[in-house]
Image (cartoon, rainbow, N blue to C red):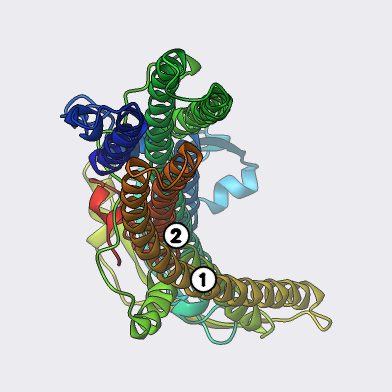
Amino acid sequence: MQHLRRAAGWASNALVAIGLGVLAVRAGAQGNEQGNQAPAGPAHAALSPATGLSLLDVLQASLAKNPQLKIATYTVAAQSGVVRTAKGQFDWTLAANGSQQHAYTPLTPVLASEYGVPGGSGVDSIVANTSTVSASAAKEFRNGISVSPSLEATRSTDNVLTQDGINESHVGLAVTLPVLRNRGRSVVDAQETSARQVLEATRMDLSQLVSDTLATAASRYWNFVAADATLAVYKASEARGSDLLNGTETLVKADRLPANDLNQVRANLADRIASRTAAEQSLLQARQQLVLVMGLGPDQILSLPAPAQDIPDATAPYDASRLAGYLQLANTKRADVLAARLRRDANRTLENAAVNQLKPQLDVSSSVGYTGLREGTNVLDYPRSVGNSPKGADVTVGITYSQSPANNAARGRLETAMATTRQSDVTLSETARTAATAVVVAYEGVRSTTMQLQRAHEAVRYYQAALDGEKEKYRLGLNSLVDVLTVEDRLTTGVLAEVNARLAYALALVTLRQSTGTIVQAGQDVQQVDPLLFSSLP
């Protein structure tokens, strides 16, 4: 900001010397050197960065108060929940059960005799008590294999056959091995893998939004700085015009200048006032845009501090050989390109899993276990049956086959998955192509604005020399006041063109940073914002 204000002050100093000095010379006051000398200080005092609004202030506020960033953060959290849900497919499932049964079985005399019930004992029914406790677990591994360990213990007592109690337990392990469908990690955990890839894509979306937000904030800040500098130039121009009018009126009253000169000076001042008024409105609009991106209220528009820093000037020469590197950056660093690539990969993951579902379901299942037995009604006899009197392993092996002849459900899912993958391929291609073209345009923009800025610097320097020449000619009586005012206005226009050229260069830097994905690191939380990124080439 100091440079642009110095430019305004420099133009003011030189032109005030012309506006007042040449009139004094025409009046025969060649000995009065004050009319030809610039004022001691600039037209506007330089701002202290401690009291002004810096780019860092704007960038931090834009991230802290942007509602779209909050929404994107919640989107990431929601997708994280989707990943957790898909992960639940491979959790252990635990189950436990307990029951107590009390049953009566009537006995006829014949049945009582067969069971060995003494006649006349009064036993006319079997009263049985059965206690059962079971526990099991089940888990599917990511390679498709499922296991299910189980334990069951039963105690049976009655008043006829098992008065001493029988405690029976069974320990087993069942394993299911898929042979065709649902076999292999790439198929079984496809939903979880795809969800994780989409989660990374949503994080890339957040990074891209952060990058866009910072780029917008930086662009609006530079527009704010340029609008403030433009207003300073117009204010200085108006002040010079006002001083020139006062001096001309004095000389006309003293009959040292023709009265017609007042019309030219007044018209010139009116034009400058109109330009200053338009510049004030442009600054107000720049303030509004800055307040919006910072998340501030409308009451902050007029009270927003003045800018505390300058628009960057061109420092590095244009190097066409760097374009290839920038194109590579866009392909590997831009968050939107990376997000499109991740979504394409997520859809391919689901497509591969859908292809597997066309296969028949062929599973080999096996179970192994043993049975323990122990007599007694003691509390400890119940758990001791688990390891008591096992005679050998119980082994079961089986094969399960199933297949739908038409298999329309699986075919339909595959068609959907293939179409979705093709869509994501096109999206990725277009995103990458758009990013590449943006890099080319942005880098050419840097080249073009660098040349514009160089020519703007030269124009101001030459206009200043031309104004010095017109001043000398006016002192010698070789031209008119109109000639001096014309060159002065051209110098003012040149200073404004220089401000606009610097703004264009600064905006081109922001665009190049944004197009190459070098504002923030994709996929990572932004802890600190470096404002120097927006004043240098990537």
Judged left or right of residue 267, residue 483 is left
- Within 10 Å of disc 1 (Cα), the crowding (few <14, some 14-19, many 20+) is some
Q: Quadrant of the C terminus?
A: bottom left
Amino acid at the residue labelled 2: Thr
Amino acid at the residue labelled 1: Val
Q: Nearer the viewer, residue 375 or 386?
A: 386
As drawn, the residue found furthest toward the right would be: 406
Spatial CA distance of label 2 from label 1 is: 9 Å
Residue 425 to residue 288: above or below = below
Q: Tell me where residue 339 appears, x and y as whole percent.
A: 49, 64
Badge 1 marks a residue whose secondary structure is helix
- Disc 2 to disc 1: CB gap under 8 Å: yes
Q: Tell me where residue 115 appears, x and y as whole percent.
A: 52, 51
Q: Quadrant of residue 287?
A: top left
Instruction: Say which label, 2 or 1, has the lower sequence index.
Output: 1
Q: Which residue is mark 1?
A: 441
Q: Nearer the viewer, residue 3 or 54?
A: 3
Residue 95: tell me if it is visible.
no
Q: Which residue is mark 2?
A: 511
